Image (tube, grey):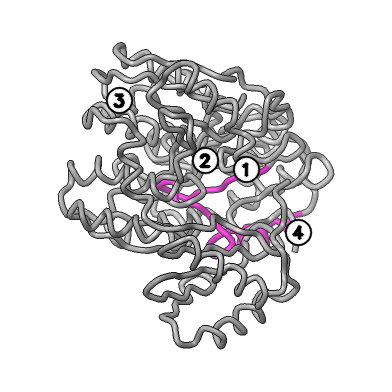
Amino acid sequence: MDSIFKAYDIRGVYPDEIDAPKARRIGHAFARYLPSHSSLLHNATHPLRIVIGHDMRGSSPVLASAFRDGACQAGAEVIDIGLCTTPMLYTALIDGQFDGGAMITASHLPACYNGIKLCRQQAIPLSGADGLPEVEALYAKTPPLPVGAAAARLAEAFLERYIERLRPFIPADARVKCVVDAGNGMGGLDTPQVFERMPQADLISMYFEPDGHFPHHVPNPAEEQNTRELQQRVISAKANLGVALDGDADRAGFIDEHGRRAPADLMIAVLAEHFLALNPGATILYDLRASRAVPERIHELGGNPVQTRVGHSFIKQAMREHKAVFAGEMSGHYYFADAGYIDSGIHALLTAVALLHAKSAPLSELISPLARYARSGEINLGVEDAAAVIDSLKKSFADGEQSTLDGLSVHYPDWWFNLRPSHTEPVVRLVIEANDEATLELRKAQLLALIGSDPLRAE
């Protein structure tokens, strides 16, 4: 198995692990995979259609051109929208009725990486559980391909059309001062134009110039070291809100008016209020690592909370199955049914701005009632045999309420934990929550002793 095929995408270090010849073969394999997974009718008049876009990394245009070349050699018509965010690519795929789409990006990873996110119709993602193994098998059988002719680009820039597509979600009368850190990623492309359509709002921009070398910090809002400057800027600017976008702008991290990081899972409950005001009684999804406060708050708002496993492919599928209007997970991915079930940093930003304006309340006031429990955060642990560890914990906590939706979750009246193997790294991830700090520390020590591993430091 080629190591560049991961749980949710294709990625590796450029050019050692992923390069133009591999991208060309992947494009060819993807174009051969799609016909049996598309409901569109293809013939000589209507060939297979694929849309492709790329981020600002130096290697991205090279990989995009090669992927496009390979797909064309397999008989597909490929439209390239060029530099874009991942939500822009999703939107182009949905609105243009394409059979599939490919985004060349390594998202929040350091500059030496690059990768490819693949989708079917309606921006349904391929993953290690659905689609990627088939593409990988076709890729493995594809010999090296010659360099062919490049496909034509769209005659008109897609950015303007995308901004118009966002217009219904833009609260034009919002009076909010917002600091946005794009981290030299793709969020600098569309955020200024969105704020131009909110004349009462004040945008303070940080690192909007796309630069795949990431000269200021890695665009990963989940890591605290990457938001420290944003937190300080929110305080000095006396802003209402801070938002950190990841490299391809499909994630968002929030900072309150005091410069404090807002926990991503609690933001699910905060943002849910906006959607439940528009859709009383609607279903909201949250990932199983989230605080108990999240489903409690959704219930308080009259909504129907449904727990889901971790990962965008699983969540998007569950949203369709449950007809959910909104979903979120601890990684900072937020999902929107009215935008085509896509995860989008700019949609999350606009929802937060609309909610703050409607409530006339600071973000800290919306979050503080949700800080009801003592929480560990996600703890990464190196183990040799994750399955054996999980089996052992099942026996040790047999008297608890157990779930194997994703790894192992065990619930007690005063505490709970989830331990699951990572889909992207050779580690297990542990989350613990308790009614108080003393119980949290006691159970944390107990679990670490049973697992037999110390927490790994974030790189």
Residue 373: image location, x then y, percent: 41, 58
Query: Mark 4 highlights which residue?
Result: 2
- Regarding mark 4 in the picture, which secondary structure is present there? loop
Query: Mark 1 highlights which residue?
Result: 71
Q: Nearer the viewer, mark 2 or mark 4?
A: 4
- The mark that comes first in sequence, 3 or 4, is 4
Front-most of residues 153 and 254: 254
Measured in 3D between alpha carbons, the distance from the residue under mark 2 to the one under mark 3, in whole angstroms, is 29 Å
Measured in 3D between alpha carbons, the distance from the residue under mark 3 to the one under mark 4, in whole angstroms, is 43 Å
Residue 404: image location, x then y, percent: 48, 76
Q: Give the total of numbered labels.
A: 4
Residue 294: image location, x then y, percent: 34, 55
| Residue in view at x 56 percent, y 85 percent | 396
- The mark that comes first in sequence, 3 or 1, is 1
Residue stretch rendered in magenta on the structure: 115-142
Say whether residue 82 is visible. Answer: no
- Regarding mark 3 in the picture, which secondary structure is present there? loop
- The mark that comes first in sequence, 4 or 1, is 4
Q: Are marks 3 and 4 in contact (CB under 8 Å)?
A: no
Q: Are marks 1 and 2 in contact (CB under 8 Å)?
A: yes
Estimate how packed mark 2 is, as few (under 14), some (14 to 19) or many (20 or more) residues with alpha carbons within 10 Å.
many
Query: Mark 3 highlights which residue?
Result: 170
Estimate how packed mark 1 is, as few (under 14), some (14 to 19) or many (20 or more) residues with alpha carbons within 10 Å.
many
Measured in 3D between alpha carbons, the distance from the residue under mark 1 to the one under mark 2, in whole angstroms, is 8 Å
